[in-house]
Amino acid sequence: MLSDPVLQWVLTLTFSATAAYSALRLVNDRKPLLVVGDSLHLVMSLAMIAMCWPWWAVIPILPQLLVFIAGTMWFVLVTVLQSQRRIPRASVGGHSAWHQVAHATMMLAMVWMILAMPSGTDSAAHTHHHGGLDLWAALTGVAITSALATAGVIFLVELIRCLRGRTTWLGHTGDVASGTLMSLGMAAMCWPMITG
């Protein structure tokens, strides 16, 4: 998807870090809602690593779409239930409903990227060139990228607050750090698709 090798490696390392953190959380978390969320973030991080490289074009699109559509719906459902106080904060790692909105946005961004990128069958060279997105794809891409960047900044502010206090990394602080990397990394990945 990306043509700049520096950006490819920076984002590969970024999403490798978020994948490692999600895997660590998956091993340590026991609450069902957290396990589902950790699993979705692990899959998303691995998919983002693949999207950095031309070989992403050979990965079937339909399974990816189904996973990330389901992930979007999952986090929307958790947001609604948490807003209605039917899910206690403790069952989602102590996070507020806005965290669930940010996670739903990330999953929706995955759906957008998959639909906006040409597949291996659409691109004979098996490279991802994004020039010429239609108006709908460009406008929705700008909205999603803006939402990701905004979430990244909010996560970053929250991370700074966490670092000023005494918190453990495997928990809220680590979750917020991972959210910062995921949101900003995904925004950095979406932007070349819109401007390319």
Image (cartoon, rainbow, N blue to C red):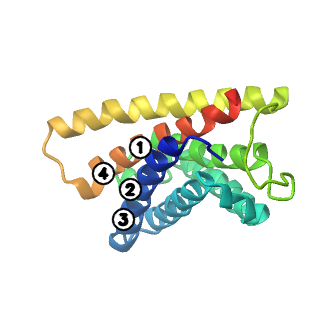
Q: Tell me, yes or no, if residue 83 can be seen here.
A: no
Secondary structure beneath label 2:
helix
Tell me the residue at 75%/37% (across/down). 130
The numbered mark at residue 134 is none
Residue 160 image point, x, y percent: 25, 33
Residue behind mark 1? 181
Residue contact at pointers 2 and 4, CB within 8 angstroms: no
The numbered mark at residue 174 is 4
Residue 2 falls in which quadrant of the image?
top right
Residue contact at pointers 4 and 3, CB within 8 angstroms: yes
Query: Is 187 rendered above or below residue 106?
Result: above
Residue behind mark 2? 17
Which of discs 3 and 1 lies nearer the camera? The answer is 1
Residue contact at pointers 1 and 2, CB within 8 angstroms: yes
- Dot placed on the residue nearer the N-terminal end, 2 or 4: 2
Tell me the residue at 38%/49% (across/down). 178
In space, the residues marked 3 and 2 are separated at their CA atoms by 12 Å
Q: Tell me, yes or no, if residue 117 can be seen here.
A: yes
- Dot placed on the residue nearer the N-terminal end, 3 or 1: 3
The numbered mark at residue 25 is 3
Identity, as a three-letter code, of the amino acid under mark 1: Leu
In space, the residues marked 4 and 1 are separated at their CA atoms by 11 Å
In space, the residues marked 2 and 4 are separated at their CA atoms by 11 Å
